[in-house]
Amino acid sequence: MKQLCKFLLKCLLAPFAALPLKVHYRISRFVAWLVGSVLHYRVPDVMVNMARCFPEMNVWDLLILKKEFYRHFANVIVESVWFGACRSVRRFDRSGIVRMKNFADFREIYDKSNGVVVMCSHCGNWELFGGLLSYFYADPVNPLDVNKLCVVYRQLSSKVWDALMRDNRLAPLKDRDSFRGYVESGAFVRYAFSHKDDRMVYYMITDQRPYFPGPDYLKVNFLNRECQTMAASAGVAHKFGHAVVYQSMMEKADGHGYEVQYVPICSDASEMSVEDIMKRYYELLERDILSQRHNYLWSHRRWEII
């Protein structure tokens, strides 16, 4: 039954996914209006989050920011649907949806380290990470083995949607079925220990609030508010002395696509405390959000304390 439902959903989305990206951006205008003004998807959460994070903004500025956020959120949706039809690296590359500003710097960090933890966020479009990974093994001169890559995710409650999203997120990979680097967050620490000598690259969305109560969560100040944060990414990097890199994903000036830049946090995390790594990560994330306030997942209930 799960396979049948997954097949039907893929058949439903396939005609839309096959459309050119510029058509998706036109559709995005309607999606923004539908989600924000008709369905009112998490509008109270969005407004409360923005108002508390930006107390200097008046109500009219917040309403303008809310409109910009739902435009961006709609782009994330249509880009993700389009991305599902990228069954090769070529379509993703030709679109120009992502421009890597300093991939050579990242490659140098990797070559000099025994592993890299890339700390990502809900800035930009996190559903495109499968495409970002394609850059690592598409380089004809110095490709990186795809088996050295790992994307950490949170399993969805629906098995059908979880399976569909796996295929969608890893769309450009040459052999999705045999790829073993798509790892559920609950299994990440065990996976990292079993690959501690393999010089891996771990992609981890790090601005998630904790999924359940635990004694080892850190409290950080993030956009004028205290929140809890999971520190597994920094903890694993510290344990094994991996390099740690922050991934900045800023929206392009025309609002269509993103520019990715890798910002080093440390070359050897064993020489830096977990608390300091997380503090630096949130400083960099806050800088990006203040630069593009709409380019963040404001519907996410990030500041709930559990």
Image (spheres, helix red, strand yellow):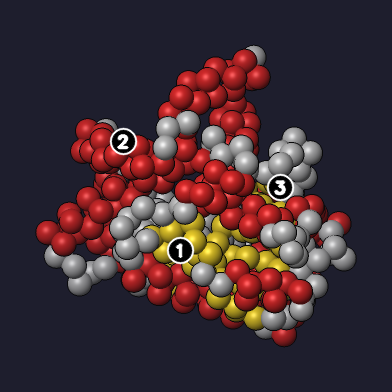
Q: Is residue 40 above or below residue 153?
A: above
Tell me the quarter of the picture where residue 177 sits. top right
Gap in angstroms between the C-alphas marked 3 and 1: 26 Å
Find the distance from the CA under tag 2 to the CA under tag 1: 22 Å
Badge 2 amino acid: Ile
Image coords of residue 110 (percent x, y): 72, 72
Left or right, 285 with reference to 88: left
Which residue occupies 22% across, 33% down?
A: 38
**Which residue is at a point 60% across and 78% down the rendered structure image?**
264
Cβ atoms at labels 3 and 2 below 8 Å apart:
no
Numbered disc 2: secondary structure: helix
Which of these two is toward me, 76 or 220?
A: 76
Q: Nearer the viewer, residue 202 or 304?
A: 202
Quote the CA–CA distance across marks 3 and 2. Answer: 32 Å
Residue type pointed to by label 3: Val
Res 27 label: 2
Secondary structure beneath dot 1 equals strand
- Circle on res. 183: 3
